[in-house]
Amino acid sequence: MKAYDIVIIGGGPAGLAAAVSARKNGIDRVLILERDKELGGILNQCIHNGFGLHTFKEELTGPEYAARYIAQAAELNLEYKINTMVMDISHEKIVTYMNREEGMQEIQAKAVILAMGCRERSRGALNIPGYRPAGIFSAGTAQRLVNMEGYLPGREVVILGSGDIGLIMARRMTLEGAKVKVVSELMPYSGGLKRNIVQCLDDYGIPLKLSHTVIDIRGKERLEGITLAEVDSHGKPIPGTEEDYTCDTLLLSVGLIPENELSNGMGIDMNRVTSGPNVNESLETSIPGVFACGNVLHVHDLVDFVSEEAAAAGKNAAEYVMREKSAVQISKDIKSPIELEAVEGVRYTVPKTVNVDRMTDRLTVRFRVGAVYQNCFVSAYFDNERVIHKKRPVVAPGEMEDIKLDKSKLLEYPDLKKITIKIEEA
Amino acid sequence: MKKINLICIGCPMGCPLTIEKDGSKIISVTGNTCPRGDAYARKELTNPTRIVTSTVAVEGGDVMRISVKTKQDIPKDKIFACVKELKNVSIKAPVHIGDVILENVAGTGVDVVATKGSSW
Amino acid sequence: MYDVIIIGAGVSGAAAARELSRYKVKVCVLEKSEDVCCGTSKANSGIVHAGYDAAPGSLMAQLNVEGNAMMGKLAEELDFPFQRKGSLVVCLHEEDRPSLQELYDKGIKNGVPDMQILEREEVWELEPNISDHVVAALYAPSAGIVCPFGLNIAMAENANTNGVAFRFNTEVTAIEHIEPGYRLITNQGNYETKCIVNAAGVYADVFHNMVSEKKIHITPRRGDYCLLDKTAGKHVSRTVFALPNRKYGKGVLVTPTTHGNLLVGPTAIDIDDPEGTNTTAEGLKRIAENAGLNVKNLPMRQVITSFAGLRAHEENHEFIIEELEDAPGFIDCAGIESPGLTSSPAIGKRIAKILQEKLHLEKNPDFQGTRRGILNPAALSIKERDALIKKEPAYGNIICRCEMISEGEILDAIHRPLGAKSLDGVKRRTRAGMGRCQSGFCSPRTMEILSRELDVSMFEITKSGGDSRIVVGKNKDAL
């Protein structure tokens, strides 16, 4: 059986950054397995600009951002396989993959980095009543058809969900000659970035209806129309607010779900909120030597942060491999890790535990909030003591938040059991 | 004196900007966290511009289409003229990122460049 | 001039076609949709009923038990997914015990084998997720689950291989008497035949009433369903029915599917529109409310899709499978609602027998009774799969990543007899697009394959025929 130090599942932004980082941290035998026909993942169809401000200090389109990492991977001579599907990863890190040329192959990895990304929530998951005609697409599917293949999925469009892909597609469809009639959002706030509302909707006069959802779908063959209704604070349609729209296309941008079929198959401990693995400060899952990063871990808003997180995973995986190789057992008093707990407005944290000995000098803890809060504080309590109290003018579920934990600070609390992260209103 | 509120589109932070205007004169820009916000506000109120991204067909390449963008931002009211000019553009492979696909699009003085490559 | 024209390529029409193909007879199936299995046959519970429900002595009871008994051998011959997993009818209230006993007694009369009434502890032993309130249950080990598409497609394909013609997108608009037989007027020209089999599902009354003075009425009875992700697929391992209760109504069933998902439903709402397969908010709400009554901790958050199907309900709740007295040579196959899927092999046999006697048909010596389904690479060992890909590289190219369906399987679906022409056609044959992302990732790729293999443009690729086009133009074409 062929052996690698690190096998990376997925060649999108997370997988590429993890691979580059692992190589730069001294690992030779790194392999990326990518199921699509090219590296870069979903960035290839995100032809709009707005990527890379953090990473490259300039504004790039998705394909350009991907190309930067692909170039680095090429420079570092990183090995990768495209059109290759990983079928299974065993608890012992035997990776089974399949492609046209090699058939079924098994390889042994010392460490595995999960970077499979996410998929879009479908109409079915929303249980929208009505017919099931052609013309209902997830926004990402429409994006692929339009941007990669040059096909127009429809001419009169309603978009359900104000996630970023939905907003971006409102503009894309408009610029390709379609009429986008309305964007409807179930929640009282948008799930996308504010700037996308400005430059994708406002610029083109596309109305955004908050607290509205689709309650009926008409058309037996191709979509003919939908009914929108306002919803109450429980998300239930309010009778009398129904409004019919004629349209041949309904795009859904109603959430992304990490694709953790392989993780589940391995029996990795999963987080119910993120639908991604629970990880420690090293972004290591419940199986030692198996790391996760990017949208498979938790859905991000910005690719720059995916790259940052993935680079950390690559570095940590490299260190894991080195430790295993040196076979030095650092068994002296293994302290139980500090638990990170998300409460009061904070829905989850990544990571979920911190081992101070293994953490970097400055550890980024990412999280999302459950509602919109104005003029609030993001606080971290070390056991019962409030140590971090960060003022934020506004936090919203659509925008990922973070706090930094300093190792030096944590070392001042040798008996620390738990760090609680919460939103405190002013 | 007039107050205008804008959301900065310079980066994903989306700072809420407040602009004080006296007639056509901008008195102040507040709410921005970086200089980009100030610049955006002034431009948005005088000559709003946007980067336009689209795709063009590729002939004889390994992909059917490649993505393109305006090299700099162009006036907002030229966006549709820009995409219309791209309608029948077809480019022969190979193409590299940064290659000029269309010069001086819609008379803006700005070139449209490839944002993806295609070999043949 | 055909000997027999069958109207409808659903499960009944396909079963009749396949049974007729055992004889030397010229048969053609006319189907208004673009594919087989497009009506009632495609949207139902996929259950092979044991046969204790139907009234003793009824044709429904007879064909149910007969069809159930035939299913195992048929699945082997025609290679479609069928699992004899058994079923439970759950009784939650002491006062309903007599109804449970009644079902058991009916089952005995109908000839259902090996039934047992289980007490609560025994029920939990079989199905730990049955409600805490269970009192007893009727266990019928002969019940099972079948892939409704698999069954329908397999029978149609096999009929076609044995010489039965199929004409799709062919809608019968009128029937005229000629001597001898009938002329069918369709949107694709006229067809003449000695005999007609009316297997038109929710439209069976329309064709019956064209030729007979003794009118019948079929009511489309809509059933909404929710399909859950495979992660919920093992929540129960048998079909779990609710025992109808005066206070709580009929309840909904919970069953594993042959694909490994969990199916919850159906509702039962009588409607007028024979094409009214829309789900409704009330229907979906009813499922959500009733699903948990018999099975606890149902993960309804795992719903990946919901759909509605129509049962062809006839007033007397009985199958009508007979030659009409006032229209010789016109054989009804009407009122085929549940347990129609279960009964279909027996229905086909019965129709073939009527026609064999009427037309004095001789055996077809070339009849080939077996058919190979689409290969399921997931059932192969790693070594076998490796060898397959080395021989046919397309099996190494995964198109549908949720269901792990390869290009090889899709190519087979397109190129076999009565092959797939649309996304739904591919989906029903291979499961590509049926998984948790509901074809988000694979539909553009499946479209490309269809376009390439059938040599049609992307604009002609549809979801399910007709005007169900997926893409409507090219970028900027209207600018």
Image (spheres, helix red, strand yellow):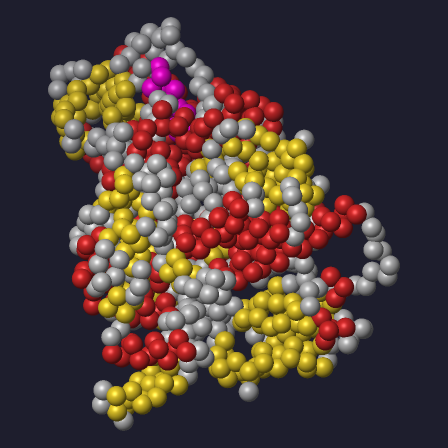
The verdict on residue A261 being magenta is: no
Residue C313 % position (x, y): 34, 41
- Rendered residue at 49%/20% (across/down): C391
- Image quadrant where one finds the N terminus of chain C: top left
- Rendered residue at 20%/32% (across/down): C171
The verdict on residue C157 being magenta is: yes
Examine the rendering and report whether any part of residue C447 can be seen: no
Residue A205 % position (x, y): 25, 69
Displayed quadrant of residue C161: top left
Relative depth, front residue between A122 and C65: A122
Residue A210 % position (x, y): 36, 71
- Image quadrant where one finds the C terminus of chain C: bottom left
Displayed quadrant of residue A311: bottom right
Per the picture, the main secondary structure of the magenta-coloured stretch is helix
Relative depth, front residue between C151 and C320: C151
Q: Which residues are magenta?
A: C151-162
Examine the rendering and report whether any part of residue C169 can be seen: yes
Query: With respect to residue A342, does C391 lie above or below?
Result: above
Displayed quadrant of residue C196: top left
Relative depth, front residue between A198 and C21: A198
Q: Is residue B34 left or right of residue A309?
A: left
